[in-house]
Amino acid sequence: MRTEEYTSAGRIDALVETEDTIYLFEFKLNGTAEDALKQIGEKGDAIPYQSGTKRIVKVGVNFDKELRTIERWLIEDDGY
């Protein structure tokens, strides 16, 4: 796992790489999981990993400050 992985367009909040999958995480606080997932696409965070053979999974997560927990998460999986 790597946090704040820098790219040419900014940084990825968290990246988890396994033997066959790369998980890209974007976190929001009192935002929306949709906005988090949208940001991964807009910034092109997955582009450096698309030339490989690993599956790419994008995860947008929103935290609720008052409840102090995850409010919602969304997953976009490109498959193999």
Image (cartoon, grey):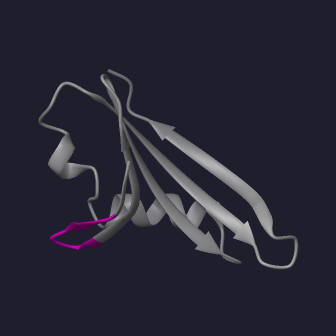
Which residue is at 66% across, 65% downward?
62
- The residue sitting at the front extreme is 1
Q: Is residue 1 left or right of residue 6?
A: right
| Relative image position of residue 49 (x, y in whole percent) | 20, 43
Q: Is residue 80 left or right of residue 35?
A: left
Locate the C terminus and report the quarter of the image it occupies: top left
Q: Is residue 41 above or below residue 65?
A: above
Q: Give the magenta range.
A: 4-10
Magenta residue check for 6: yes
Please identify the dominant SS of the magenta region: strand
| Relative image position of residue 34 (x, y in whole percent) | 59, 61
Q: Is residue 10 left or right of residue 18?
A: left
| Relative image position of residue 45 (x, y in whole percent) | 28, 58
Which residue is at 21% across, 73% downward?
9
Residue 23 falls in which quadrant of the image?
Answer: top left
Q: Is residue 58 above or below residue 11?
A: above
Q: Is residue 49 left or right of residue 78?
A: left
Which residue is at 71% across, 67% downward?
63
- The residue sitting at the right extreme is 67
| Relative image position of residue 36 (x, y in whole percent) | 53, 64
